[in-house]
């Protein structure tokens, strides 16, 4: 079940993107699962269809979903590429650097990463 907080500081398209990625990581959405149409999601959450399209487009660019004309958008088969690993490494570097800048120790950051990863098992 995807939830969106309209009062959050996080943009709605980012919330939608992140919830779908998390659902895939948790196995709640599996390869081949068809996502609701842009229009249906926009109506369900009372948001602009362009917001949903922006989230879907980002997911497509990241390889999380594939879109076929007249068939809709489905969850893609998982395939970690070198480019994917490089992008994730860059994002993790930024997040971990921020944690260090905020005063967290390497051990605290490692423990946090381990705890988060355990939720995806």
Image (tube, grey):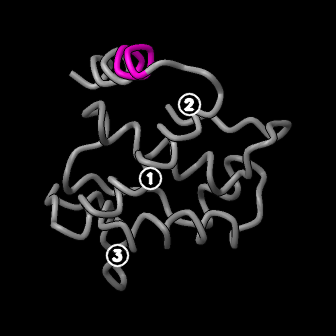
**Magenta residues, as a range?**
106-112
Secondary structure beneath dot 1 equals: helix
Secondary structure beneath dot 3 equals: strand
- Which residue is found at the position 56% from the left and 63% from the top? 55
Query: How many neighbours does mark 1 have within 10 angstroms: few (below 14), some (14-19), or many (20 or more)?
Result: few
Residue 99 tag number: 2
- Which residue is found at the position 50% from the left and 66% from the top? 56
| Rendered location of residue 101, percent (x, y) | 62, 34
Magenta highlight on residue 101? no
Of callouts 2 and 3, the N-terminal one: 3
Q: Nearer the viewer, mark 2 or mark 1?
A: 2
Q: Which residue is mark 1?
A: 91
The majority secondary structure of the magenta stretch comes to helix
Q: Is residue 28 left or right of residue 19?
A: left
| Rendered location of residue 81, percent (x, y) | 16, 66
Query: How many neighbours does mark 3 have within 10 angstroms: few (below 14), some (14-19), or many (20 or more)?
Result: some
């Amino acid at each position: 079940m995807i939830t969106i907080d309209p009062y959050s500081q996080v943009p709605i398209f980012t919330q939608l993107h992140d919830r779908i990625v998390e659902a895939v990581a948790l196995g709640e959405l599996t390869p081949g699962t068809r996502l609701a149409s842009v229009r249906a999601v926009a109506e369900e959450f009372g948001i602009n269809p362009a917001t949903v399209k922006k989230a879907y487009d980002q997911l497509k660019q990241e390889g999380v979903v594939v879109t076929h004309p007249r068939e809709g958008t489905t969850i893609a088969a998982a395939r970690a590429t070198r480019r994917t690993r490089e992008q994730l490494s860059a994002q993790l570097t930024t997040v971990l650097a921020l944690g260090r800048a905020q005063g967290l120790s390497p051990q605290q950051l490692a423990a946090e990463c381990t705890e988060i990863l355990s939720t995806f098992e």
